[in-house]
Amino acid sequence: MSANQELCSLRWNAERQVVEVIDQTLLPHSLQWCELESLASYCHAISAMQVRGAPLIGITAAFGLAGAIARDPSDENLSRASKALLATRPTAVNLGWALAAVAAAVRDIEPGARARVALAKARQLRAEDIANCSRIGEHGLALLRGLKPDGPLNIMTHCNAGWLATIEWGTALAPVYKAHAAGIPVHVWVSETRPRNQGTYLTAWELQRAGVPCTIVTDNACGQLLRSGAVDCVLVGSDRTAANGDVCNKIGTYLKALAAGANGVPFYALLPASTIDWECAGGDDIPIENRAESEVLAVSGADETGQRRELMLAGSGHRAHNPAFDVTPAALVTALVTEYGSVAASSVGLERLRAQISSSSPM
């Protein structure tokens, strides 16, 4: 059973032969599903952040490529659709990983059978993501039990790394849901995550639906909370992890890692192994997505009547810099938690993980 017990972020409608996703740009005020049919609709869903989170971006792209192959199974269209989807967002490595998996599955298949194989591969990746996130939750729960066997646990997180960022369970939130289900008292400090406010809009909404106590705090309040002893550990996700253990995650993650390190608070990054970029030597080599200035200069929400509104925050003519991600050096990461267990955030730790992946299945 998924953490939300009723929802997932992406579902396959077999009757209509379309993918349905939750439009996350409308949360928390409106829960609406939208259908993805054309390649353009898939590209828009990813770039406009109707779907977001590295694992979900990858799965969405896999279905998008499968849909493009169903319309035209030629090599030329396979290449064209892959390039279009890959260009939507540059930082999350799962995007290219999932597209490569679908392309490899159909490359040596005659065109008439490609649509069936591509769809089967996309559905397989979706099922594997659910299983892997559940395993990440179990491994993370073991770490939480080690911190406070009986709780109560006060956990800080940043951005959204729950089931809205994956298919079910999530990454950084998976241990929280597992702890809550096990009866361990847990409370989550949810940083707002400016400028897109994924913490406020998505994480708090998820946790509230699951009955997990949480408190929204401004991004700038997190250092003081860590200093005051109000936080037992920090759990974050990762959009791309370099081979040396550097972690690229939502902008603002680095500041929390610095504050956690200065105050002796464990800082864990939880991620599926598919998020590790084995060809990326370190964080300086990770491409950082820069998004529109308007995301910083304006904010959207619902007015007292429930109508969605956008308000300007800055005066006319102001400029803004809007990097979507930052890099947390491996030295600030207590451990990386994957579906294979916990490893040191280092070149040595990741090489050991790579060997484990080659020789075994997730635990």
Image (cartoon, helix red, strand yellow):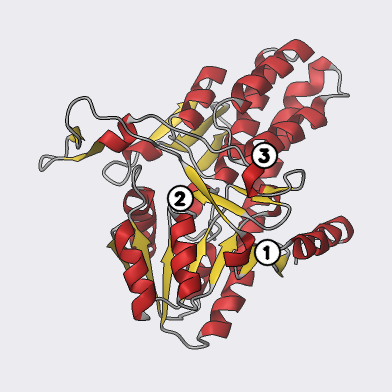
Q: Are marks 3 and 1 in contact (CB under 8 Å)?
A: no
In the rendered view of the protein, which quadrant contains the C terminus?
Answer: bottom right
Q: Residue at x 72, y 44 (%)?
A: 280
Q: Residue at x 86, y 60 (%)?
A: 355
Q: Residue at x 28, y 58 (%)?
A: 218
Measure the C-alpha gap from mark 3 to mark 1: 31 Å
Residue 268 in the figure: left or right of residue 301: right
Which amino acid, mark 3?
Arg
Q: Earlier in the sequence, mark 1 or mark 2?
A: 2
Measure the C-alpha gap from mark 3 to mark 2: 17 Å
Residue 237 image offset from top left, x and y in percent: 54, 56
Disc 2 packing (10 Å; few <14; some 14–19; many ≥20): some
Residue 35 image offset from top left, x and y in percent: 47, 28
> What secondary structure is marked by label 3?
helix
Q: Does residue 184 lie above or below 225 as drawn?
A: below
> What secondary structure is marked by label 2?
loop
Residue 49 image offset from top left, x and y in percent: 44, 35
The residue beneath circle 3 is 123
Check residue 140 in the rendering and tell me which mark sits there, or answer none.
none
Q: Earlier in the sequence, mark 3 or mark 1?
A: 3
Q: Are marks 3 and 2 in contact (CB under 8 Å)?
A: no
Residue 253 in the figure: left or right of residue 99: left
In the rendered view of the protein, which quadrant contains the N terminus?
Answer: bottom right
Disc 1 packing (10 Å; few <14; some 14–19; many ≥20): many
Which residue in the rendered view is the most extreme toward the bottom? 150
The residue beneath circle 2 is 7
Q: Is residue 251 visible?
A: yes
Which amino acid, mark 2?
Leu
The residue beneath circle 1 is 345
Q: Is residue 211 visible?
A: no
- Which of the two residues, 272 or 117, is positioned nearer the viewer here? 272
